[in-house]
Amino acid sequence: MKDLIQLKDKNIVVMGVANERSLAWGVAKSLFEVGANVIFTYRKERSLSKIEKALNDNNLEAKLVVECDVNSDESMKAAFELIGKEVGVIHGVVHSVAFANAEDLKNDFINTSREGYAFAQDTSAYSLIAAAREAAPFMTEGGSIVTMSYLGAERVLEGYNVMGIAKASLEASVKYLALDLGKNNIRVNAISAGAVRTLAAKGISSFNTILHKIEETSPLKRNVTAEEVGDMTVALLSNLSRGVTGEIVYVDSGYNIMG
């Protein structure tokens, strides 16, 4: 069974590490454990320093760390071309990128600004399409792309607002990309992660209420960890899931099944 993972020495791009509490870092740790070559992208110098600190604190070494602004087609293209030039083949991409303006999360959804709506869509959903387009030419051996979603994509969660709409777009994009890239043996899936205390979660006013509700009502009666999300991501990146594409996989203690 271990042989089916087949991620040792494979080149996996991880986008979206904000700090050591982010889902992307949980994924990266799981990838390091199975011997993958982990390539990080970052947007700003602050993010770069967070990645470097996380690597140093855990005595880990990245294969490559590359600047990439997901709101810029030119930056995305340059980043993946640099990665392709350095490593030759990309075997997987982890897209853990989402952002919305604070006022669009705090105010009633009906008051979402046109600019705020477009920005949330561009950063949180279109960035997956752009990443897939730029990575695909270097995924010459097939591979897997995994993005991070949340239950707010399909249910109304108070305070999630415009991000819920962006995640709905993200999940639809997963399915259309799965069709486009399937002929190249590239699989595209999403993980709908349960509530994890991340930097992004701080922007959701009802987050603590959500945490308690999951503990009370989910089948497992607990919240999930970034490590658990990371391990499932490894499964979706690996040969274990070679027949799976276009799926939304829930890692949320079963909370999504409850009425």
Image: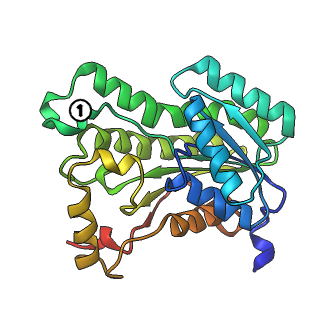
Q: Quadrant of the N terminus?
A: bottom right
Quadrant of the rendered image containing residue 39: top right
Q: Position of residue 61 (x, y in %)?
A: 78, 52
Q: Left or right of 255: which side holds 87?
A: right
Residue depicted at 57% across the width and 37% down the height: 47
User: Which residue is nearer to you in this view: 230 or 137?
Assistant: 230
Quadrant of the rendered image containing residue 123: top left
Please say whether residue 246 is visible from this viewpoint: no
Q: Left or right of 243: which side holds 39?
A: right
- Colouring of the image: rainbow
Residue depicted at 70% across the width and 28% down the height: 79
Q: Position of residue 58 (x, y in %)?
A: 68, 60
Residue depicted at 72% across the width and 67% down the height: 33
SS state under label 1: helix
Residue type, label 1? Asp
Q: Residues within 10 Å of mark 1 (few under 14, many from 20)?
A: many
Give the mark count.
1
User: Which residue is nearer to you in this view: 74 or 60?
Assistant: 60
Q: Left or right of 114: which side holds 63?
A: right
- Which residue in the structure is indicated by mark 1? 104
Quadrant of the rendered image containing residue 219: bottom left
- Relative height, residue 100 to residue 245 (above, below): above
Q: Position of residue 74 (x, y in %)?
A: 63, 17
- Relative height, residue 241 to residue 75 (above, below): below
- Relative height, residue 60 to residue 231 (above, below): above
Please say whether residue 104 is visible from this viewpoint: yes
User: Which residue is nearer to you in this view: 178 or 81?
Assistant: 81
Q: Position of residue 205 (x, y in %)?
A: 21, 49
Q: Quadrant of the C terminus?
A: bottom left
Residue depicted at 57% across the width and 29% down the height: 44
- Relative height, residue 247 to residue 177 (above, below): below
